[in-house]
Image: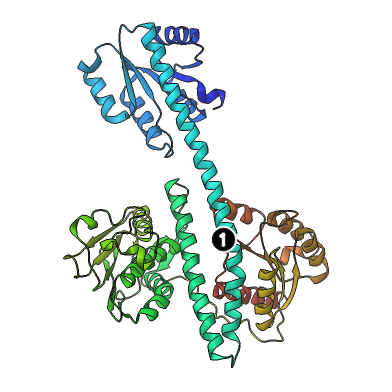
Amino acid sequence: MSELEQRIVVFSPIGKDARLIEQVLGQARVVCHICLELDAVVAELEEGAAALFVIEEAFNDDFMRELTGFLAAQPTWSDLPVLVLSKEGLDSPGVQRIFERVGNVTLLERPVRRATLVSAALSARRARRRQYEMREVDRRKDEFLAILGHELRNPLAPIRTAMDVLNTIPNSDPKVRSISQVVERQVRHLTRLVDDLLDVARITNDKVALQCERVSAATVLQHAVEICRQQFDSCGHVLDLRQPAGSVLLFGDRARLVQSLANVLNNAAKFSPPKSTIHLHAEADGEDIVFTVRDHGIGLEPEARSRIFDLFVQGQAGRAHTLGGLGIGLSLAERFTRMHGGSIAVTSEGRGNGCEFVLRMPIVVPERRSKERPAAGPSLGHSDDTLRVMVVDDNEDGADMLQVMLEMEGCTVAKANDGQAAIALAGRFHPHAVLMDIGLPDMQGYEAARRIHDLDGGGDIVFIAMTGWGHDEARRRASGAGMQHYLVKPVDLHVLRKYLTEIREQALQRA
């Protein structure tokens, strides 16, 4: 704990209570900071405090509103102790209101003994110290999970790229193609597990911010179905898909909307017998968009319905473990839906009668036509329109696989394995695009991108970050370093091809 975090903030705008409290606690070596004005209280608490000491008379409507707002915004590890000095104790209507709205309250009734005052302050400070220790534990856990995600994604990237290359080789051995498709399915599955784990960590620490944009309901449905297509095909399921009439635009986070719907679809596929029909219907209902997923699987008992959206519940008849999964997909769907101001509910008539999940989100934009840009095709164009691409990655397998894939697409490719080599190579190679890893051995990719930008002609280069770091801070730093695109490993190669197609078109226009 810092010195600020060990002090007690005292708010006593009338009388001599503040000085008396400071004097008594000072003798016990407890540092106090006195606030005489309402505006100063929350500002001081935000700097750090072991506890807040308030006289009952200070709890007017303005102060109650400011304090409860601050307490409601506390991070998950924090529960600020509030010590209240009262004349009437529990008989006071004002004290009852404080208990109802403030939370972690210790009541001290006047006249209060010095020993009682000091004991309460020391106990509050001790409890607060434990909270700050939990903050440090959370910080270290977040760092560990970020590193874990990075380290797991790095080896997945070259495997996925290699599978893409094998699948595009014409007239390859059918057995090789079949084996490569198995590996690709398992890589996709492992990637989803890693992403779900990291999303849970970010959500529980309030570190997920929605990146809202206009997106069509048809796009959300299409991408969710694409994600689940392999599982549907492997189980022989049939999808009954019904889209809303007309064009419906949503305002939300495209990735999170797709992820929520895909997690529910994945759950339906997992718990349905082979060759089942799974229904996915979407319709506009007033100002809401309603997605309904219905299956004919094993169903839910009443007690399971109440906890199916809890974290790590592998809940349907206890069979989730044998069917694979971590028990977090539906929890993520519920949380992302709620973050959009919506709701998700499940109904089931019991074991063997299937389930119906309804996702309702109040994000319909009443427009007739989508304003989304049409997606570029996967081809990079004619071979004579050579696109120069520089790959910067210290994972040599990953760089090699990208080079093979890009050269098959007609690009001219150069590689560098660290930042200094990339800067030197860029001056000779004059790339149109740079695929930049972030965790390079000699400098971070952000710095390498800035220095390449400063070279003659560097302002025209388009940078695509390709990294195992998926957290928001890394994205912001990449944008600040002038990187126009950000892809998390293992990279979706269809998205990469789209970016490169756009870069080629821009280069041709400049020429």
Residue 429, image quadrant: bottom right
Task: State whether residue 483 appears in this view.
Answer: yes
Q: Amino acid at mark 1?
A: Leu
Residue 160 vs residue 12, the one in the foreground: 160
Q: Residue furthest front?
A: 322
The N terminus lies in quadrant:
top right
Asked if 124 appears above or below 456 in the picture, the reply is above
Q: Residue furthest bottom?
A: 171
Please indicate whether residue 372 sits to the left or right of residue 72 in the image. Answer: right
Please indicate whether residue 73 sits to the left or right of residue 484 in the image. Answer: left
Q: Position of residue 370 (x, y in %)?
A: 42, 72
The C terminus lies in quadrant:
bottom right
Residue 363, image quadrant: bottom left
Question: Where does label 1 land, which residue?
Answer: 152
Q: Position of residue 150 (x, y in %)?
A: 58, 57
Please indicate whether residue 76 sits to the left or right of residue 88 in the image. Answer: right
Residue 411, image quadrant: bottom right
Q: Position of residue 118 (x, y in %)?
A: 41, 12
For label 1, count other residues whose C-alpha is less than 10 Å away and answer few (under 14), some (14-19) or many (20+).
Answer: some
Q: Residue at x 71, y 78 (%)?
A: 387
Residue 8 vs residue 503, the one in the foreground: 8
Asked if 157 appears above or below 501 in the picture, the reply is above
